[in-house]
């Protein structure tokens, strides 16, 4: 056995290992350090597999104590960390684990079928803060970000950036200093590419007048009645989001809804919030509708347990249909005392909106030259003139609100004259490109062998449409991209990954498992479903549901494999999926579609705050999660479905 001595600082070590040559790392100079973070890289199999006939690496962690002035005596093995090896020895996978003993000896052994060499790399790093203190630090940072967003102290993008900076500073303080390249890798570029590509597509699409035309048609279909129109929009959004990405659905629906509300003299905020709530509900119905579901059906260990695309979609679809049926009357109850119509005439509302848009346009111009300064002055003068007209109209205005437009047939004719398709050739090009993009989205969901991610599909579609549309002034299209939303997501990805490094998500998973183990065996399955469901829902309202789902899956697998617990894995996974998807409606930053919708609405002058969304979204989240929990308990506990 080879023995090497290292000090307790961050150290990179690369070596090759076979069955005849184990390696021992003697880490004795820890002083007052609280934790040891061990990161191992090698040709590993991601996930958990049955090691009966598999090749694997065994890492044994032993604690030592002083037996004399010059000798140290190793005690019993405290941890056994088993990592399965990939048969082809090709993929380099990095895995990390943290230990709470001091000082220690780490022994690395290879168990292989032949005497082949296994290339490994190892980094061990001492941390100065215990797990409990790390969780407290992470909770304080997350709470601070929420305070900034809830009370609108700063813009939510700046709040996310400050939170991610604070989390990185906390990591540096405890001794875990991620490099710049590591932090950049934390950002989910596929999501950012999807958002950017779809923003370009929608920006060009809006030039055709198609959204105004759709608004008039929806007004005609609802015969001027508000609630039939809202129900139609929410139902279509829920159906589309079951097959498309939630973000894509809201990017297509938000401009149509805003224009339709302007036609009906409605406040778009309440209608948009209702739409995005039903988008998140509909996304939970299938295996491709929401990112947590995609993570679940893509997990190889869960596939071996019988959770595939068909079985997962079939069970979730039935439950979400039940949730949808009860959500519409509950939404009507929540909106019972809300004034959906604007309190002023449509002329005054449009004039206010025009003033807001012209002012935003003027503020975006940076007076770098004499001409730009002159243009900005002209725009501000136009704003002053419009404000003067607005004051005159307000003096003579008499409020007349009608719950139903009795002259809707006459208005339809006027609206058709004002809102026509302005560029039919461009419309054909946009529909063709968007149709191909959506078809590729479906193809990617059902035929994963094409190896083309959603972000790349959206980027290719945007580039293709830019070429076909022959856009001369490219800057106009770029001005319509929600750069603040993209930056918010980038900062949010860094924040959530840093909080995961601070053990926050792991702590939630471990505490959930401990609560389940404390329940008597005859009630354990029912209590496990309830706990996993509500912990997932509440956690997904506060933190991103993607890293939470990815962290909870191995926790639940370990729990199901524990002989003392004796729980089936399928009910726990379905409870996780139901809670993670429906929990996104709890807060404004609980789901990506919420943030995208708020960003587009803000660009159109109808932005809504965190509390405006919370007053409607959180009660809907509680109601839908309650119905989902009852569905799980009735089918699994009551009917005894084996799934």
Image: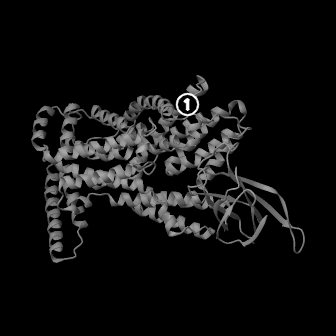
Q: Quadrant of the N terminus?
A: bottom right
Q: Where in the figure is residue 7, as x and y percent of width and height?
A: 72, 73
- Asked if residue 534 lies left or right of residue 423, the reply is right
Residue at the (32%, 35%) spot, across then down: 236
Judge whether residue 638 can be spotted in this image: yes
Residue 274 in sight in this render: no
The quadrant in which residue 518 appears is top right
As rendered, which of 598 and 348 lies closer to the eye? 598
x, y percent for residue 587? 45, 48
Left or right side of 389 for 175: right
Please give the residue where the numbered disc 1 appears in the rendered image: 632
* Disc 1 secondary structure class: helix
User: Alpha-carbon neighbours of circle 1 within 10 Å: few (<14), some, or many (≥20)?
Assistant: many
Left or right: residue 126 compared with residue 281: right
User: Whole-percent x and y of residue 124?
Assistant: 66, 66
Q: For this view, does 15 lie left or right of residue 292?
A: right
Residue 362 sits in which quadrant? bottom left
């Amino acid at each position: 056995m080879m023995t090497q001595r290292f000090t307790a600082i961050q150290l990179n070590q690369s070596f090759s290992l076979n069955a005849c040559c184990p390696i021992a790392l003697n880490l004795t100079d820890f002083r007052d350090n609280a934790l040891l973070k061990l990161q191992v890289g090698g040709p590993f199999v991601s996930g958990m597999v049955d090691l009966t006939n598999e090749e694997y690496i065994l890492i044994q962690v032993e604690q030592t104590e002083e037996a004399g002035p010059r000798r140290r005596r190793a005690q019993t093995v405290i941890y056994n960390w088993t990592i399965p090896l990939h048969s082809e020895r090709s993929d380099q996978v990095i895995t990390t684990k943290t230990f709470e003993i001091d000082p220690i000896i780490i022994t690395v052994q290879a168990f292989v079928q032949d005497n082949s060499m296994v290339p490994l790399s190892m980094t061990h790093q001492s941390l100065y803060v215990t797990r409990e203190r790390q969780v407290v630090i992470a909770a304080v940072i997350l709470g601070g970000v929420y305070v900034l967003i809830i009370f609108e102290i700063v813009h939510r993008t700046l709040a996310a950036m400050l939170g991610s900076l604070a989390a990185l500073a906390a990591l540096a303080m405890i001794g875990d200093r991620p490099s710049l390249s590591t932090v950049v890798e934390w950002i989910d570029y596929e999501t950012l590419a999807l958002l950017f590509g779809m923003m370009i597509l929608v920006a060009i699409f809006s030039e055709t007048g198609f959204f105004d035309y759709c608004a008039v048609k929806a007004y005609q279909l609802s015969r001027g009645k508000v609630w039939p129109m809202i129900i139609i929009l929410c139902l279509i959004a829920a159906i589309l989001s079951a097959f498309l990405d939630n973000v894509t659905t809201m990017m297509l629906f938000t401009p149509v809804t805003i224009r339709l509300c302007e036609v009906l003299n409605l406040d778009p905020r309440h209608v948009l919030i209702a739409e995005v709530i039903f988008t998140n509900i509909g996304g939970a119905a299938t295996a491709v509708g929401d990112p947590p579901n995609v993570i679940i059906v893509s997990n190889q260990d869960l596939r071996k347990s019988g959770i595939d695309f068909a079985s997962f979609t079939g069970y979730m679809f039935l439950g979400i249909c039940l949730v949808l049926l009860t959500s519409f009357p509950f939404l009507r109850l929540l909106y019972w005392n809300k004034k959906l119509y604007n309190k002023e005439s449509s002329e005054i509302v449009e004039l206010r909106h025009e003033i807001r848009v012209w002012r935003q346009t003027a503020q975006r111009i940076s007076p770098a030259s004499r001409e730009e300064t002159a243009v900005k002055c002209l725009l501000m003068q136009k704003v002053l003139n419009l404000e003067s007209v607005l004051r005159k109209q307000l003096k003579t205005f008499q409020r007349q609100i009608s719950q139903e437009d009795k002259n809707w047939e006459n208005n339809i004719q006027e609206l058709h004259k004002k809102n026509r398709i302005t560029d039919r050739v461009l419309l054909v090009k946009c529909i063709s490109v968007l149709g191909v993009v959506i078809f590729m989205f479906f193809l990617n969901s059902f035929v994963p062998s094409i190896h083309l991610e959603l972000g790349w599909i959206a980027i290719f579609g945007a580039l293709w449409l830019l070429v076909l549309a022959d856009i001369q002034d490219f800057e106009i299209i770029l001005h319509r991209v929600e750069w603040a939303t993209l930056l918010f997501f980038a900062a949010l990805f860094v924040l959530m990954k840093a909080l995961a490094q601070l053990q926050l998500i792991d702590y939630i998973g471990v505490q959930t498992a401990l609560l389940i183990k404390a329940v008597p065996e005859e009630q354990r399955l029912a209590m496990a479903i309830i706990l996993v469901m509500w912990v997932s829902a509440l956690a997904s309202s506060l933190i991103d549901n993607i890293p939470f789902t990815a962290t909870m899956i191995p926790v639940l697998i370990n729990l199901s494999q524990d002989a003392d617990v004796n729980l089936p894995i399928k009910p726990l996974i379905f409870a996780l999926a139901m809670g993670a998807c429906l929990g996104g409606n709890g807060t404004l930053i609980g789901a990506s579609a919420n943030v995208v919708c708020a960003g587009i609405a803000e660009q159109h002058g109808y932005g809504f705050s965190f509390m405006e969304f919370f007053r409607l979204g959180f009660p809907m989240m509680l109601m839908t999660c309650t119905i989902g929990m009852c569905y799980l308990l009735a089918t699994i506990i009551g009917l005894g479905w084996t799934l």
